[in-house]
């Protein structure tokens, strides 16, 4: 078992280690010397022992060190997990990027440069630079499948796009695997996250003006709706409409304000064939997807839906199965499953469907 992170030491040398639970001594430590590009550090974890805090200390004989510590990978990985993802026939076609993070950024699996301001937590990498094995591994699989199946032009729609994370990851996957023209459509209701999406595009050499980015919520019909939001954009990406399951069960302490609203029918009407429709709209999928299912059936090849309440799992499953779509994976909201990658907990449901009428 190992802990992984990346350190760029500009001057001197540092020690990175794990303390005992009481914090009285080091259980293990790895020293990192001066380096220009940043060094991937592996700290072996003692078998069977509890661990304490991760500590950084100056070990330079010159008395001073300067370091940027970008915690790109902060998780515990077993050799079995590493082997499973490295051998997976889909992930093995998309190699982890070797690029280092720019100062103030995190670098992702495919080389995405993500401003550290966008989240209070890094977008963690997993074994050998692959994504970590958690519920998002199946969102990654959908994205990589859609990229691998694309021909001539890749079109992706992300509903509830946040800062455009999955859109930019798709572009980076295309650049590596099969460079071709691409068109990205992002819909995001929260003002700060929408502005971050524009920045995230530019930070990764994507001109937002060449794509379609909507500052709006998604619901069954266009118009105006009320958004429930936290006061700290970097801390919370769980914005919900007040008329959804999550909105009606929310407590006090959230901001409520009106935002424009578009429907999936409205978004898809502007497009021809869509390779991937990625949906993460915190309960609004209960109304928005059924209202647009005929349009989705005509135009979309791959769908990945993050499902935010257990009763919505069944609604979405019946909707696509009745139209003959192929279910690639389906994991229930708030479930724990034994998957091909091992035990995974699903705080939100994940469903990936492929349209046999449009599939490669």
Image (spheres, helix red, strand yellow):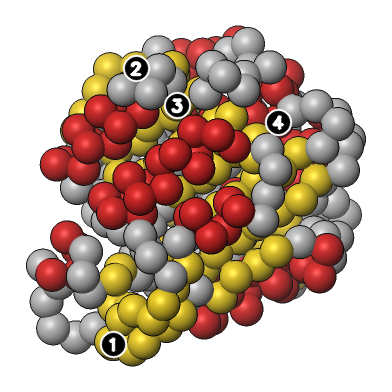
For this view, does 186 lie left or right of residue 226?
A: right
Between discs 3 and 4, the one toward the N terminus: 4
**Is residue 17 depicted above or below 58 in this figure?**
above
Residue under label 2, please give it: 339
Which residue is at the front of the view, 317 or 201? 317
| CA distance separating discs 4 and 1 | 37 Å
Residue 199 spot, x, y in % from top left: 72, 73
Residue 247 spot, x, y in % from top left: 20, 70
For this view, does 144 lie left or right of residue 328?
A: right
| Residue at x-position 76% and y-position 45% | 171
Q: Which mark is residue 144?
A: none
Count of marks, rendered view: 4
* Label 2: which secondary element: strand
| CA distance separating discs 3 and 2 | 17 Å
Residue 129 spot, x, y in % from top left: 65, 34
Between discs 4 and 1, the one toward the N terminus: 4
| Residue at x-position 28% and y-position 54% | 287
Between discs 3 and 2, the one toward the N terminus: 2
Asked if marks 1 and 3 touch (Cβ < 8 Å), the reply is: no
| CA distance separating discs 3 and 4 | 15 Å
Q: Which mark is residue 255?
A: 1
| Residue at x-position 25% and y-position 28% | 318
For this view, does 21 lie left or right of residue 234?
A: left
| Residue at x-position 22% and y-position 37% | 315
Residue under label 4, please give it: 147
Q: Residue 353 carries which label?
A: 3
**Is residue 48 depicted above or below 216 in this figure?**
above
């Amino acid at each position: 078992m190992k802990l992984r992170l990346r350190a760029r030491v500009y001057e001197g040398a540092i020690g990175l280690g794990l303390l005992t639970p009481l914090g009285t001594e080091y259980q293990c430590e790895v020293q990192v010397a001066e380096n220009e590009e940043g060094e991937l550090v592996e700290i072996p974890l003692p078998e069977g022992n509890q661990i304490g805090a991760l500590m950084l200390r100056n070990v330079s004989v010159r008395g001073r060190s300067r370091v940027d510590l970008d915690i790109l990978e902060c998780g515990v990985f077993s050799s079995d997990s590493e082997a499973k993802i490295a051998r997976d026939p889909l992930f093995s076609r998309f190699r982890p990027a070797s690029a280092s993070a720019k100062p103030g950024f995190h670098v992702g699996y495919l080389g995405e440069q993500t401003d550290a301001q966008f989240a209070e937590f890094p977008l963690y990498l997993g074994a050998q630079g692959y994504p970590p094995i958690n519920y998002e591994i199946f969102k990654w699989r959908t994205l990589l499948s859609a990229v691998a199946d694309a021909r001539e032009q890749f079109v992706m729609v992300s509903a509830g796009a946040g800062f455009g994370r999955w859109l930019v990851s798709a572009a980076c996957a295309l650049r590596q695997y099969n460079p071709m023209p691409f068109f990205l459509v992002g819909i995001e209701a929260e003002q700060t996250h929408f502005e971050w999406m524009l920045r995230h595009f530019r930070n990764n050499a994507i001109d937002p003006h060449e794509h379609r980015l909507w500052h709006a919520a998604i619901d069954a019909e266009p118009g105006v709706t009320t958004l429930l939001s936290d006061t700290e954009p970097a801390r919370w990406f769980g914005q919900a409409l007040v008329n959804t399951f999550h909105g009606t069960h929310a407590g006090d302490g959230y901001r409520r304000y009106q935002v424009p609203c578009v429907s999936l029918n409205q978004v898809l009407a502007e497009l021809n064939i869509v390779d991937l429709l990625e949906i993460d709209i915190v309960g609004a999928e209960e109304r928005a997807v059924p209202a647009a299912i005929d349009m989705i059936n005509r135009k979309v090849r791959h769908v990945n839906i993050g499902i935010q309440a257990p009763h919505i799992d069944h609604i979405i499953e019946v909707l696509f199965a009745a139209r003959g779509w192929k279910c690639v994976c389906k994991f229930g909201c708030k479930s724990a499953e034994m998957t091909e990658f091992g035990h995974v907990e699903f705080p939100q449901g994940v469903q990936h469907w492929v349209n046999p009428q449009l599939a490669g």
